[in-house]
Amino acid sequence: MKRGFTLTELLIVIVIIGVLGGVAYPLANKVKKRAQGVACMSKLRNMGIGLEGYLSENNQVMPPLFLGRNSKNEDADVLEVLLLPYLGNDEFAFKCPSDHEHFEKSGSSYFWNENLSNIRSTRLTFLGADVDRSVIPLIFDKEAYHGDKNGVNFLYADQSISNKINFKTSSRD
């Protein structure tokens, strides 16, 4: 005679599956967010490569760009328009995987540091001070897509990518 599962055994199995699911879901979500952050950094690195292509064709002068635009229909010289040919005309090159709002409206998940527009790349400054190129942000996320703490990724003038703010100040005595 075949014996089936009792109600108690079925409930125990369901509870075990629920507990495993409750543990696995947050871990999977954390891994997904980390992967999206890495993909975003990769896109910033590609933008840096595209920017280098632009600079080599334009006498090492930074592009004359605005910070960003409010909608895709706005006619403005912005990052996603000027660098598009240098990134293989891939419009999604400017979409952070964690962005679910800005790219759809404006065509980019990133801002350009417009204070650097039309400046020779060898003469970049940060807030008027001569500093190491590793502290001069060129392109950065429009929002903290990757969490509250260190949630913004940056492409710096030395072509480094980081989610850490490298802005340094010194006090005067």
Image (cartoon, rainbow, N blue to C red):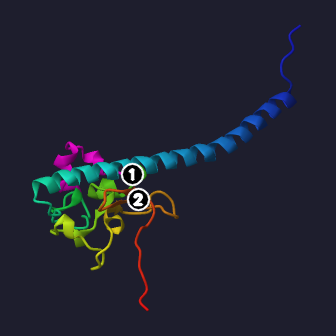
Residue 17 coordinates in the image, percent (x, y): 72, 35
Residue 49 coordinates in the image, percent (x, y): 25, 50
Instruction: Describe residue 99's horizontal placement relative to residue 15 as left or right.
Output: left
Residue sitting at 22 percent across and 69 percent down?
116
- Which residue ends up furthest to the right in the rendered image? 1
Q: What element carries label 2?
A: loop
Q: What element carries label 1?
A: helix
Q: Which mark is residue 41?
A: 1
The residue tagged 2 is: 153
Please identify the quarter of the rendering in which residue 20 is found.
Answer: top right
Residue 19 lies, with reference to residue 126, above or below; the image says above
Comparing 101 with 26, the one in front is: 26
Magenta stretch: give its range: 80-96
Q: Are marks 1 and 2 in contact (CB under 8 Å)?
A: yes
Residue sitting at 19 percent across and 58 percent down?
73
Comparing 89 with 59, the one in front is: 59
| Secondary structure mostly taken by the magenta-highlighted segment of the chain | helix
Comparing 52 with 28, the one in front is: 52
Q: Which of marks 1 and 2 is nearer the N terminus?
A: 1
Q: Is residue 41 magenta?
A: no
**Callout 2, which amino acid?**
Asn
Q: Distance between the residues labelled 1 and 2?
A: 7 Å
Please identify the quarter of the rendering in which residue 122 is found.
Answer: bottom left
Total labels: the figure holds 2
Q: Is residue 83 magenta?
A: yes
